[in-house]
Each structure stands twice: as structure tokens, then as C-alpha cells.
Amino acid sequence: MSNFNVRNIELKDYEIINDWWELNSYEKPPLSLLPNNGLGGIVVEKEKPIAVGYIYMTNSKIAYIDYIISNPNYKAKDRYDAILLLVSHCINHAYDLGCDRVWGMSNVKGIINRGIEVGCETTTQDYTIITHNSGKIKFN
């Protein structure tokens, strides 16, 4: 792979990453929903960041990888490799932190293909994602 630097996300990266969310027409996640207040992830860069992903650790030996996003203006031929390296590094870092299982979900074909390329299993079953984000439930 090309000369990439892989490092932990730093607070200074957040402004750059926010621009990517907007440029990709995605809603940016607030820092409070990111692991370690936005610092719980990995950056792949050359002179500037190319792609980031976040690793959610749990109180068990399982980690969840999410919010993978890349600079939409980075069009170099090694873009595929940069994101492949990011996915691989996130998975390996979770194992280095003591996890026995790593999972994630995506509907982005490029992310799915990179996961398959590094040996992840996928499913084609449909699931319903159930979330609640409007405060505590009130009982009568």
C-alpha cells in the first residue's frame, strides 16, 4: 500500500471530518455520540486526513465500528487502499484492546466490499434497526 500514516483521531481533526459529513450530504454525529467524545477512532492520512472510522468499545469483549467516512475530494488512485487500511486497522485495534469479536453494519457497497476483502462475514438478511433518541419513556 502507498505511504499512509495511521493514527488516533485528535480534536483538531473534528472540523475537517465535519466538512466531510456535509460534503457527503450526511448528518454529522455530535461529539457526544462518538466514542471518547470524538477521539475514539482512527485516521488514515497522507499529508492530510483521507478517511476516519470510530471504534465503540463495550463492557464486554465486543467492539462496534461505525461512522466510517472519507474525504469526498480525495480522488487519488490509492483511495480504495486507504479505506481498506482504515477498516483493517480499526478491526485490528479492537482486537489489540482485548476484543474477541468486532462487528459493524453498513449499506455502503464500498465498505461492505472492503470488509469482505479483509475476511469479514456478511449477511444479506434484512434487519430493522431500532433506536430511541427522544428522552426517557414515561409510563402512565
Image (spheres, rainbow, N blue to C red):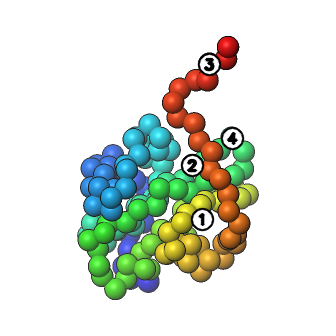
Label 3 packing within 10 angstroms: few (<14), some (14-19), many (20+): few
Disc 3: which residue: 138
Point 37% across, 49% down: residue:
28
Upstream in sequence: badge 4 or badge 3? 4
Where's the C terminus, which quadrant?
Answer: top right
- Could you tell me which residue is drawn at 44 percent across and 80 percent down? 81
- Amino acid on which disc 2 is placed: Tyr
- Dot label at residue 59: 4
Q: Kindly state the secondary structure of the residue where label 1 is placed.
A: helix
Q: Nearer the viewer, residue 38 or 46?
A: 38
Q: Earlier in the sequence, mark 1 or mark 4?
A: 4
Which of the numbered marks, if any, corresponds to residue 92?
A: 1
CB-based contact (under 8 Å), mark 2 and mark 1:
no
Distance between mark 4 and mark 3 Cα atoms: 27 Å
Indicate which label's residue lies in the foreground, 1 or 4: 4
Please tell me the numbered disc located at residue 56: 2
